[in-house]
Amino acid sequence: MCDACGCVHEDNHEHQESGTRKRVDVHESLFEANRAKARENRKHFDGRGLVVINMISSPGSGKTTLLEKTIDTLGNEIRIGVIEGDIETERDAERIRAKGVPAVQLTPGGACHLDAAQVHRGLHLLEQERGGEDIRLLFIENVGNLVCPAAFDLGEHQRMVALSVPEGSDKPAKYPKAFGTSQLFLISKTDLLPYFDFSLEEARREALLINPDLETIECSTVSGEGFDQWLDWLRRLCAA
Amino acid sequence: MHEFSLVQGLMGQLETLAAENGAERILLVTMEIGPFSGVVVDSFRFGFEALAPLTPLTRNARLIVLQLPQRYGCRDCDNEQDMDGDARPEDCPCCGSREIFPLGADDVVLRQVEME
Ligand SMILES: Nc1nc2c(ncn2[C@@H]2O[C@H](COP(=O)(O)OP(=O)(O)OP(=O)(O)O)[C@@H](O)[C@H]2O)c(=O)[nH]1
Ligand SMILES: [Mg+2]
Ligand SMILES: [Zn+2]
Ligand SMILES: [Zn+2]
Ligand SMILES: [Zn+2]
Ligand SMILES: [Zn+2]
């Protein structure tokens, strides 16, 4: 705090209060514009009876594979839709469409995260896809990145952070925001536990320190271990 | 690099503020960037230096960034400690507990604007 004027900066500066110079206290978050859009999205989602899950993880943690398997087992029970946030390609959306489920690919073009405005556009694009009109469960597969997506509310109801065994169990401590803002922590590729130095205990403990309310599911789409727990979690969300 | 899109949003906010206050030039912009915001301060500065000269309103604007310390809380007592840089405390200096968690300051806030 500057004693001369009560301003918040500390470096030397001139105070020629010339009468035209004006200091305005603002206190506004730069994320507020996105938050406002996210609130609109949430109304949009609720109005259409959608349950929306924002999937955050590093690249390659197994998100699209998990979605494919989920559609295989749950597709007849719950109408699923997917918004994909890959950076450059349509590949993930094509994998989902191959399962007969409506999907749109947002390509943020080198950006490191999806924002609420992009998701709003994605929602309208999805409505134009076959079957896109009556979805119950909408997955948003965010851009692979544990830092930036955590800072942008998309209006989702549930945020999940996925961490695959090869990435290491120290990640919750290193990326507190992704774990602090999520409701579900999915530890994926648990079939690989025998081959990696991954401590389930450490991962769970660190994540719970940041976020005591975080639910944890350990799951492998290869061995099928823990997959039922994941399906039950989804069923509970959609039943509510 | 979402710092760039955040700076773009900031420029819009500055325009609105200038209009509301009948100002023609932004002189000084003070930001507060939390250590857990996911925003890299150097990238934010870079974005500001790239975008500010593009309009007469912000051509001569200076940016001040207040960096808040990384603060950690203890689950076993109410102690809070600040850390420098990216270091993370091993335990609580107060009670020795290892139950340490990051606290608050994950926002990027426009604090103050000087204009004329
Ligand atoms: N061992 C093992 N491999 C898996 C599992 N799930 C996915 N994989 C493999 O991990 C790789 C990446 O899987 P994807 O589903 O494409 O991962 P993603 O998170 O969608 O990747 P991006 O969208 O590129 O970030 C593929 O080679 C999958 O076959 C698993 O449970 N166990
Ligand atoms: Mg994918
Ligand atoms: Zn001053
Ligand atoms: Zn709309
Ligand atoms: Zn980023
Ligand atoms: Zn303590």
Image: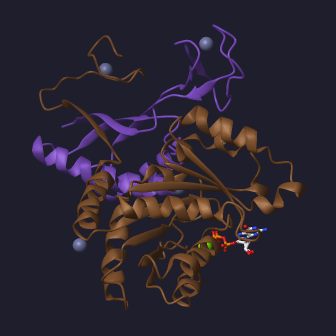
Chain colours: A brown, B purple
Q: Position of residue A111 (x, y in %)?
A: 51, 66
Note whether B7 is above or below A103 in the view shown. Answer: above
Quarter of image, ligand 1: bottom right
Q: Residue at x 31, y 83 (%)?
A: A127
Side of A76 relative to B23 (left or right): right
Side of A220 relative to A234 (left or right): right
Q: Position of residue B85 (x, y in %)?
A: 64, 29
Note whether A156 is above or below B102 in the view shown. Answer: below
Note whether A131 is above or below A146 in the view shown. Answer: below
Between A193 and A31, the residue placed more toward the observer is A193
Note whether A213 is above or below A73 in the view shown. Answer: above
**Which residue ends up furthest to the top in the rendered image?**
B94
Side of A107 relative to A225 (left or right): left
Q: Residue at x 33, y 55 (%)?
A: A34
Q: Residue at x 33, y 42 (%)?
A: B61
Q: Position of residue A185 (x, y in %)?
A: 59, 50
Q: Residue at x 39, y 54 (%)?
A: A153
Between B92 and A228, the residue placed more toward the observer is A228
Q: Position of residue A103 (x, y in %)?
A: 45, 82
Quadrant position of residue A194: bottom right
Residue B40 seen anywhere in this rendered image of the structure: no
**Which residue ends up furthest to the right in the rendered image?**
A195
Residue B81 seen anywhere in this rendered image of the structure: yes
Between A1 and A90, the residue placed more toward the observer is A90
Quadrant position of residue B116: top left
Side of A69 relative to A225 (left or right): left
Q: How many marks?
A: 0
